[in-house]
Image: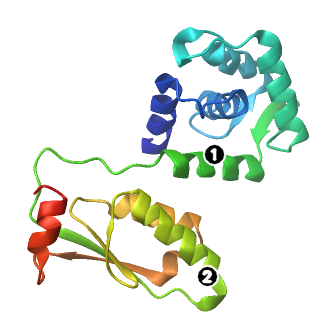
């Protein structure tokens, strides 16, 4: 549910990144709860979710329909018959991958009201053959606010285990990382100042 909450926040934000295809695909995923399969008629529900100023921009019915048609052409969604012979819309694996990518764009680590006095140290030893994955994972850590302690170790003061596991799995490096929770280390004063702790 946390991922879907982030999608809802994204829709409510009016963020320029919320282009019509993203909004439509996310709305379809929300309409499909608890799974990612929904009756074709429920597209109307998804369309109503995004047909109005509630999500920062009003899209015309034609824009929405064109977007849904475009998603079908891109193989993000497909129409299939269920056991009862009714036509349903299914978000494909490619569509699910897009949703995960949007989630990666939106992921953030919430700062608690009070620091618990512990540090989260992410260490990794990613094989050379995955150098591109290593680079993007490292870049995402930096984007999330981590500070590089050594070449393959990054540190952050707040709980972030779930978020980092999600990010690492997305980039295909989950089995090469470890997250340590530590109470203190040499020269931590400089980082305490950096994070204003």
Label 1 close to label 2 by CB (< 8 Å): no
The answer to whether 13 appears left or right of 122 in the picture is: right
Describe the element under mark 2 as helix, strand or loop.
Answer: helix
Q: Quadrant of residue 37?
A: top right
Location of residue 4 in the rendering, given as x and y in whole percent from the top left corner:
50, 38
Residue at image mark 1? 99
Residue 100 shows in the view: yes
Name the mark nearer the viewer: 1 or 2.
2
Q: Is residue 103 above or below residue 66?
A: below
User: How many angstroms separate mark 1 from mark 2 (CA)?
Assistant: 24 Å
Residue at image mark 2? 131
Query: Pointer 1: residues within 10 angstroms few (<14), some, or many (20+)?
Result: many
Location of residue 107 in the rendering, given as x and y in whole percent from the top left corner:
45, 49
Residue 82 shows in the view: no
Give the position of the C terminus as an image quadrant.
bottom left
Give the position of the N terminus as an image quadrant.
top left
């Amino acid at each position: 549910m946390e991922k879907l909450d982030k999608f809802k926040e994204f829709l409510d934000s009016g963020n320029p990144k919320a282009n019509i295809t993203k909004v439509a695909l996310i709305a379809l995923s929300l309409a499909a709860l608890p799974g990612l399969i929904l009756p074709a008629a429920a597209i109307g529900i998804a369309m109503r979710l995004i047909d109005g100023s509630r999500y920062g921009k009003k899209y015309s019915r034609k824009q929405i329909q064109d977007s849904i048609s475009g998603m079908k052409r891109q193989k993000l969604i497909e129409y299939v018959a269920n056991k009862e012979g009714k036509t349903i819309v299914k978000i494909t694996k490619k569509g699910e991958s897009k949703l995960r990518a949007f989630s990666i764009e939106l992921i953030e680590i919430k700062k608690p009201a009070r620091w618990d006095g512990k540090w989260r140290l992410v260490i990794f030893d990613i094989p050379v053959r995955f150098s591109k994955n290593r680079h993007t994972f490292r870049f995402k850590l930096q984007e999330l606010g981590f500070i590089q302690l050594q070449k393959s170790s990054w540190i952050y003061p707040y709980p972030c285990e779930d978020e980092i596991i999600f990010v690492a799995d997305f980039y295909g490096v989950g089995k090469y990382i470890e997250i340590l929770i530590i109470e203190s280390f040499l020269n931590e004063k400089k980082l305490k100042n950096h994070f204003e702790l």
